[in-house]
Image (cartoon, rainbow, N blue to C red):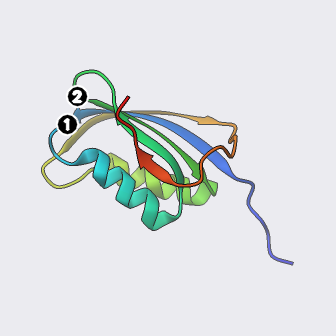
Amino acid sequence: MPYIHEPGCIHIFVSGKVQGVGFRAFVQRTANVLGLSGWVRNVGYNQVEAIAEGSPDVLKRFLETIRVGPRGGRVDDVNFNWEVPLGEFDRFEIRYR
């Protein structure tokens, strides 16, 4: 019988040149490719917040990709916390509030 991973949740804050460079769209595309659900939004000056749910192994890859960021952007700092997944998301979206 295959090992089944319990779902995980990661809450991420990214600082740097993350606004005006397509960072939210980059995060959304990455999450969609990896099959994650959740959201991303701008918060404050030069900061983006994201919550993603999925397999812990996939969430680690997501975090690694976000640390690099898109071409034209610059990631100065990434803070994150592992949280209990609530299973409340059915897709990954860009939020505007």
| Residue with the mark numbered 2 | 46
Residue located 43% across and 67% down the image = 33
Residue located 36% across and 49% down the image = 66
Residue located 38% across and 53% down the image = 28
Q: Which mark is residue 19?
A: 1
Residue 32: % across, % down = 45, 62
Residue 58: % across, % down = 55, 60
Image position of 85 (left or right of 73): right
Label 1: how many Cα within 10 Å (few below 14, some 14–19, many 20+)? some
Label 2: how many Cα within 10 Å (few below 14, some 14–19, many 20+)? some
**Quadrant of res 13:** top left
Going by the numbered disc 1, the residue's amino acid type is Gln
Considering only order in the chain, which callout, 1 or 2, is on the residue closer to the N terminus?
1
Question: Which of these two is toward me, 47 or 96?
Answer: 96
Which quarter of the rendering shows the C terminus?
top left
How far apart in space, not on screen, are marks 2 and 1 (Cα)?
Answer: 6 Å
Residue 6: % across, % down = 75, 55
